[in-house]
Amino acid sequence: MTETIPFKLNGKATSLTVDPERKLLWVLRGDLGLTGTKFGCGASLCGSCTVVVDREPVRSCQLAMKDVRGKEITTIEGLAQGGKLHPLQEKFIEHGGMQCGFCTPGMIMNAYGLLLKNPRMTRAQIIAGMDRNLCRCAAHTRILRAMEEVAGRK
């Protein structure tokens, strides 16, 4: 069974006819060709699939399409505006916050969602907020520095 599900994606009204139980991750990657959102663990543990839904970072691998009806979704592809990278993207590059790059979109989207709620996060708040996003390359300290700079803490 399929349903037509309207939502806003990266600032644009979107409507798709899909299985309402299908996970957002697979719709983004397979149906919409937005491959910046990565499949990591598939169990909402690693954070590679993080996107922002209604200003809240969420794991798209566990979010059913029926749960995004009428909501606003931002993916890594939606952060850059007018050909200019978002400050988080710039600082991740500047501080070397992505070694292999696989976790980077999820890290940036989680950071973006956290900073939307609290743009002046402390170091402790950043560490706590990013704790569930995993990086196998151990770029965590560089990611922390990038976030601190965007939050105006460095």
Image (tube, grey):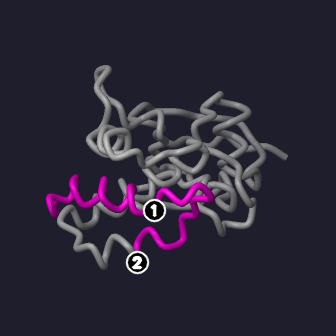
Residue in view at x 41 percent, y 56 percent: 54
Over which residues does the magenta segment extend?
128-154
Can residue 143 be found in the magenta stretch?
yes
Measured Cα–Cα span from mark 1 to mark 2: 12 Å
Q: Is residue 80 above or below residue 121?
A: above
Q: Which residue is mark 2?
A: 128
- State left or right for residue 9 relative to residue 145: right
Image coordinates for residue 10, horizontal then vertical, percent: 43, 36
Q: Residues within 10 Å of mark 2 (few under 14, many from 20)?
A: few
Q: Please tell me whether mark 2 sits on a helix, a strand or a loop.
A: helix
Which residue does the image show at 54% across and 55% down from the upper left? 50
Name the residue rendered at 40%, 63% in the picture: 141
Within 10 Å of disc 1 (Cα), the crowding (few <14, some 14-19, many 20+) is: some
Query: Residue 94, how many percent across, how many down?
Result: 31, 40
Disc 1 is placed on an element classified as helix
Residue 140: mark: 1
Q: Amino acid at mark 1?
A: His
Looking at the picture, tell me which residue is in the foreground, 153 or 26: 153
Residue type at mark 2?
Answer: Ala
